[in-house]
Image (spheres, helix red, strand yellow):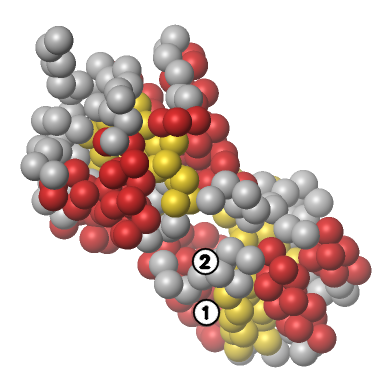
C-alpha cells in the first residue's frame, strides 16, 4: 500500500506543492507516499528507482524525460504502474506541461513589448529536459521574430535565488546586456529581480523579468512577477488519481497535457529607449 515518487529536489516549492497534492489523494485512498529526491543527479535517481522497486512499491512516478539507460531498464522491467510527470515521454504514460511552449510564451510577451535583446537564465540543461526545452522555446520565439538568443546571452546556473542573482550578474556584465530576461523558474526570477534592484536598475523600466511557475510569492514581490502559470497542484492531484485508477485495473491514458498560461504582472514592461 505504498506509492513511490522520485523528484529532483524537495527544496523547491513547485515540487513540494505537487507532492503535497499527490499525498493528499493517496492518503484518501489508503496508500502511503514514499519520497526520494536526487538533487539533479542521474546516478542518484537510478539508485533511488532501484531502491523503490526493491522495497515493493505498488506504483512509481518520476519527473522528466532525461534518465540514464539503467533507470529506463528498471522502469521497463517493473511490474508496477509507472507515470512520468512534468514532461512528455512516449514510452510511458505521461502527465505533462509543454515546457518549450512555456519559454515561447514568455519570450513572445517580451517581444510584443518591443524587446529585441532578450537573455535567459536557466538551470543546468544537461540531464534536465525541462530546462533545455524552456530555453529552446525562448530561442524559437526570438528566431520567429527575426532575433536571436546566442549562447553568451544564456546564464546557466543553479535553480535557486542565489543562482538567479549570479545569472543576472553574468548577463549584465555582457558588452550588450539584455533589456529583458526569461528565467527558467520563479525562484531564479526572484534572484534576478533582487540582483537588478541591488544595482540600481528599475524593474521593468530598465529591465523586464519573466519567470515560469507562478509560485505564490510571485504575486507579492515588488514589483509583482510576470510569469507562466504551471498548474502543479493539479498535476500532483491528477497523478495520484491516475495511479490509484491504475492500481484498480484501469489503463492510464498515454498522454495528458495540462494547460499553461501567461500571467502578466508588473515586472515586465516596454523596452527602454537606449541612446548612443
Along the viewing direction, whichever of 72 and 252 lies nearer the viewer? 72
- Return the mark for residue 65: none
One can see residue 74 in this view: yes
Q: Of callouts 1 and 2, which one flags the residue occurring earlier in the amino acid sequence?
A: 1
Q: Locate residue 104, reporting x and y percent.
A: 45, 30
Q: Locate residue 225, reporting x and y percent.
A: 23, 46
Q: Is residue 151 left or right of residue 197?
A: right
Place residue 153 in its image quadrant: top left
Q: Is residue 24 above or below residue 238?
A: below
Q: Is residue 9 above or below residue 133?
A: below
Place residue 63 in its image quadrant: bottom right
- Secondary element type, mark 2: helix
**x 69%, y 64%: residue:** 42
One can see residue 229 in this view: no
Q: Locate residue 221, reporting x and y percent.
A: 16, 54
Instruction: Please name the residue that numbered disc 2 is placed on.
Output: 236
**x 72%, y 68%: residue:** 43
Q: Is residue 69 above or below residue 155?
A: below
Q: Residue furthest right?
A: 77
Q: Residues within 10 Å of mark 2 (few under 14, many from 20)?
A: many
Total labels: the figure holds 2
- Return the mark for residue 23: 1
**x 70%, y 89%: residue:** 1
Q: Locate residue 255, reporting x and y percent.
A: 69, 48
Place residue 201 in its image quadrant: top left
- Secondary element type, mark 1: helix
Tag 1–tag 2 contact (CB < 8 Å): yes
Q: Is residue 203 left or right of residue 13?
A: left
Q: Is residue 166 left or right of residue 57?
A: left
Q: Residues within 10 Å of mark 1 (few under 14, many from 20)?
A: many
Calculate the distance from the C-alpha at mark 1 to the C-alpha at mark 2: 8 Å
Quadrant in which the C terminus is drawn: top left
Amino acid at each position: 500500500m505504498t506509492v513511490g515518487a522520485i523528484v529532483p529536489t524537495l527544496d523547491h516549492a513547485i515540487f513540494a506543492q505537487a507532492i503535497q497534492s499527490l499525498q493528499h489523494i493517496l492518503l484518501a485512498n489508503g496508500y502511503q507516499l514514499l519520497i526520494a529526491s536526487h538533487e539533479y543527479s542521474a546516478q542518484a535517481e537510478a539508485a533511488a528507482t532501484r531502491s523503490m522497486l526493491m522495497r515493493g512499491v505498488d506504483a512509481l512516478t518520476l519527473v522528466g524525460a532525461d534518465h540514464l539507460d539503467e533507470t529506463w531498464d528498471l522502469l521497463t522491467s517493473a511490474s508496477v504502474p509507472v507515470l512520468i510527470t512534468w514532461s512528455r515521454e512516449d514510452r510511458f504514460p505521461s502527465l505533462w506541461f509543454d515546457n518549450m511552449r512555456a519559454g515561447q510564451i514568455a519570450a513572445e510577451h517580451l517581444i510584443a513589448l518591443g524587446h529585441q535583446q532578450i537573455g535567459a537564465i536557466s538551470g543546468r540543461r544537461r540531464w534536465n529536459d525541462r530546462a533545455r526545452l524552456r530555453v529552446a522555446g525562448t530561442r524559437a520565439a526570438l528566431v520567429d521574430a527575426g532575433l536571436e538568443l546566442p549562447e553568451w546571452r544564456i546564464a546557466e546556473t543553479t535553480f535557486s535565488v542565489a543562482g538567479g542573482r549570479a545569472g543576472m550578474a553574468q548577463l549584465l556584465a555582457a558588452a550588450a546586456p539584455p533589456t529583458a530576461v526569461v528565467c527558467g523558474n520563479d525562484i531564479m526570477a526572484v534572484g534576478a529581480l533582487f540582483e537588478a534592484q541591488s544595482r540600481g536598475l528599475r524593474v521593468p523600466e530598465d529591465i523586464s523579468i519573466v519567470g515560469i511557475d507562478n509560485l505564490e510569492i510571485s504575486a507579492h514581490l515588488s514589483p509583482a512577477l510576470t510569469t507562466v502559470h504551471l498548474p502543479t497542484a493539479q498535476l500532483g492531484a491528477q497523478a495520484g488519481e491516475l495511479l490509484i485508477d491504475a492500481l484498480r485495473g484501469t489503463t492510464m491514458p498515454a498522454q495528458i497535457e495540462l494547460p499553461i498560461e501567461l500571467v502578466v504582472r508588473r515586472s515586465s514592461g516596454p523596452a527602454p529607449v537606449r541612446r548612443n
